[in-house]
Structures are given as structure tokens and as C-alpha cells.
Image: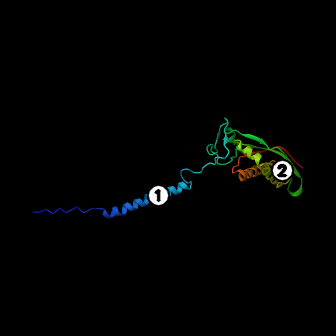
Amino acid sequence: MAETEKEPKKKGGMVKKLLIPLVAVLVLGGGGAAAGFFAAGMIGGGEHEDPNAPKVVLKDGTTVSAKAAGLKQVASGSHLDAKFKVTYLPIEEPFTANLRGGGGFAQMSLAVSTYFDEKVPAALTEHNIAIRSAILMAISDFDPIQLETIEGKEQLKGQLKKVINDVLVDKTGFAGVEDVYFTSFVVQ
């Protein structure tokens, strides 16, 4: 008597046929999404630093990138004085400008400070004319009464810092002035 052996039925044939392409789609889709996020800078590499950007000078004189120092842009606050070396740079010639409303003029001498390396002083020197023009425009936008108060002078300092850094960003791609100081100040 011949025994006929029956092959056992394959189980899950349909499941395997559906599961393999589904897994392949998920793996490829996930890989594509990850590559897209990486390319967009959302994961992984992030922003790349400009090799021409100025470096922050630490108290010991060594320089590091602003990113390595934890700075995204020019920061505000005296807490940075404890960590970084500050450099004070006088702006050579005084400024004289008519004030808004025709009520007088202001004459002042300025200095700036930076935590960055020699690239910021070099940029200040190279773009001196554009910076001086922006400073004169900012001064002439104030009126004499504003400049009689400490608050008005602080507003002017903030505006001067902004216009100097705006010129630096426009001309060089980086800012670097931390603060502006009056070394003489006369309003008439």
C-alpha cells in the first residue's frame, strides 16, 4: 500500500507577501525622512560656522569659535566679562551732529568693546566711513531733551550699538560690538 504524503499547508503565505514590501517601504521611507531632516539641519550637523567669522577671546588669551563658547550672537550682559577677555577700542575722531528739531547739536567721543579677536577691530577700521555715517544718522535722530536724561543717553548707546553692528553685518557678515561708551559728551 502506498502512502501518500501530503505536504503541510504553508501558513502565512499571504502575510509574508504583504509584510516584506511593507517593511521595505517603512525602512526606505524612514531613511529618506532622516536624510531629509539631516540635510535641512534639523538633526545631526546643524549649522556650519563661517571660518572667516571672528573668534571669542578667552581670559587666558586663547580663541574659540562663538559656537564653542556658547554664543549665538553678540550677547548682552556683564556676566560675559568673567569668562571672556574684553577689548576696548576708541573711535578716533569725535562726532558732531545737529539734533532733531533744530534745537541744538551734540558732540561726543565714543569707544566700543568686543569679546572677539582682531577681526572685529580690523572691520571697524576698514568700514570706518560707513560706521561713522550710521552713527551720525543715529545721533541726529535724537532731540536735546532726550539726551539730558540718563535714560536718553542709554537709549542712544543702544541705538549706536545696533547701527554699528548692522553695518558690520552688512559689510562683513558678522557683528562683534558688545557695548558703546561715551568718552566725552556735550549737548548744546
Coloring basis for residues: rainbow
Which residue bears the numbered disc 2? Answer: 147
Find residue 69 and report its image quarter.
Answer: top right
Q: Where is residue 94 in the image (x, y as percent from the top left)?
A: 85, 46
User: Could you tell me the amino acid type at mark 1?
Assistant: Gly
User: Which numbered disc covers residue 126?
Assistant: none
Q: Where is residue 159 in the image (x, y as percent from the top left)?
A: 77, 51
Residue plotted at (72% across, 53% down): 170
Specify few, some or many for label 2: CA neighbours under 10 Å numbering under 14, 14-19, or 20 or more: many
Residue plotted at (74% across, 44% down): 122
In the picture as drawn, the residue positioned furthest to the bottom comes out as 14
In the picture as drawn, the residue positioned furthest to the top comes out as 60
User: Could you tell me the amino acid type at mark 2?
Assistant: Leu
Q: Position of residue 82 (x, y in %)?
A: 68, 38
Q: Nearer the viewer, residue 120 or 181?
A: 120
Instruction: Say whether disc 2 or disc 1 marks the residue closer to the N-terminus.
Output: 1
Q: Position of residue 73 (x, y in %)?
A: 67, 48
Residue plotted at (72% across, 40% down): 86
User: Element under label 1?
Assistant: helix
Find residue 10 and report its image quarter.
Answer: bottom left
Quarter holding the N terminus?
bottom left
Asked if disc 2 and disc 1 are in contact, CB closer than 8 Å, the reply is: no
User: Which numbered disc covers residue 30?
Assistant: 1
Specify few, some or many for label 1: CA neighbours under 10 Å numbering under 14, 14-19, or 20 or more: few
How many discs mark residues in the rendered view?
A: 2
